[in-house]
Every structure is written in C-alpha cells, then in structure tokens.
Amino acid sequence: MNHFRIGILTLSDKGSIGERVDTSGAAIRELVEPIGDVIEYQVLPDEQAQISEFLCQWSDLQLDLILTTGGTGFAPRDVTPEATRIVIERQAPGLSEAMRAAGMEKTPHAMLSRGISGIRGQTLIVNLPGSERAARESLEAILPALPHALKTLRGDTHDCGG
C-alpha cells in the first residue's frame, strides 16, 4: 500500500488561541494512519487569507492530501470553503457530495455543510466539518476511495479503465 503525505489543518478561532482542544484533528489523524503519514498539522483562526496561504504552502510542499476541519457552516466566520475555492485548480465535487449524503443518513444538519473538495497541482484538498463526530463520519464516507484518488493524482492510472 502506498503511504501518502498528509496535512491536517484545523480552523477554529478558539482553538487557535488555546481555548478549545482540537479533537477533530486527532480523530482525523487516527483515521488516516493506515494510508499515510501526517507531515503537517496546524490550528489556525478562521481567517480566509491565512487559510488560503497555508493551503498553497502545503500544496507546494507536495503533500498528497490536505484535510481541513472546521469553518464549513453558516456562521459569519466560516470561510474555509471560500479559502479553498481560491487555491484549487479543479473541483472534486463527488467527495463532498458523498460526505453530505452519508451525513444526511444521520442528521438533516449535514445538508448545512458548505465544505468543498478540489485539486491543486497533485494535492487533493478536502474540507471536513468541524465537530469531531461529523469530521470522523465524513472522512469514513470517503476514505475507501482516497488511496485510488491519490495514486491517480500521482499519475498512476494503472487501475483506471482507459
């Protein structure tokens, strides 16, 4: 199995100043351990420019996968999708659609997630919700497809029917 280079970016005003413990980031780390190594981890405030800057820097470090958690809801400071949209070159809507569909099986609130997914260079960026439970459930919904997606981004199209 390929081991991928992964970054986890937690977006939380309170978490960035130590007023909240980042349980979502820890849950994400645990779930991705079988497919890769978490090379980068950071907790940032909900500041669009700063989020976009980190996503660009981490993509330039040639991480295979960046998972964000937080900032995907309707609150005025929830700007993660906007920060992500600025830096991605191609969208990957099926991932976000799958996460919302899986979440809808448990709660109607899942439809309120504005998270997006997309590609910058050879890096896949996926916005996960901020709560530990929602982040875990969302990642579990797409985790089976991620190794194939990441291998394909690296240029390995051996398993692609064409």
Image: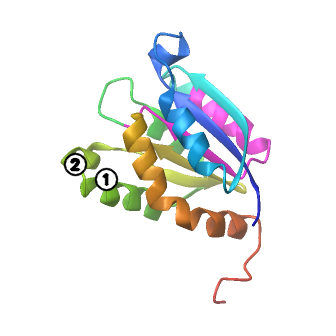
Q: Amino acid at mark 2?
A: Thr
In the visual, does 118 lie left or right of 3? left
Callout 1 crowding tier (Cα within 10 Å): few <14, some 14–19, many ≥20: many
Check residue 103 in the rendering and tell me which mark sits there, or answer none.
1
Q: Is residue 56 magenta?
A: yes
Q: Quadrant of residue 77?
A: top left
Q: Is residue 71 magenta?
A: yes
* Residue placed furthest toward the right: 61
Q: Are marks 1 and 2 in contact (CB under 8 Å)?
A: yes
The span picked out in magenta is 50-72
Q: Quadrant of residue 1?
A: bottom right
Check residue 107 in the rendering and tell me which mark sits there, or answer none.
2
Q: Secondary structure at mark 2?
A: loop
* Residue placed furthest toward the left: 108
Q: Position of residue 93 (x, y in %)?
A: 45, 60
Q: Quadrant of residue 159?
A: bottom right
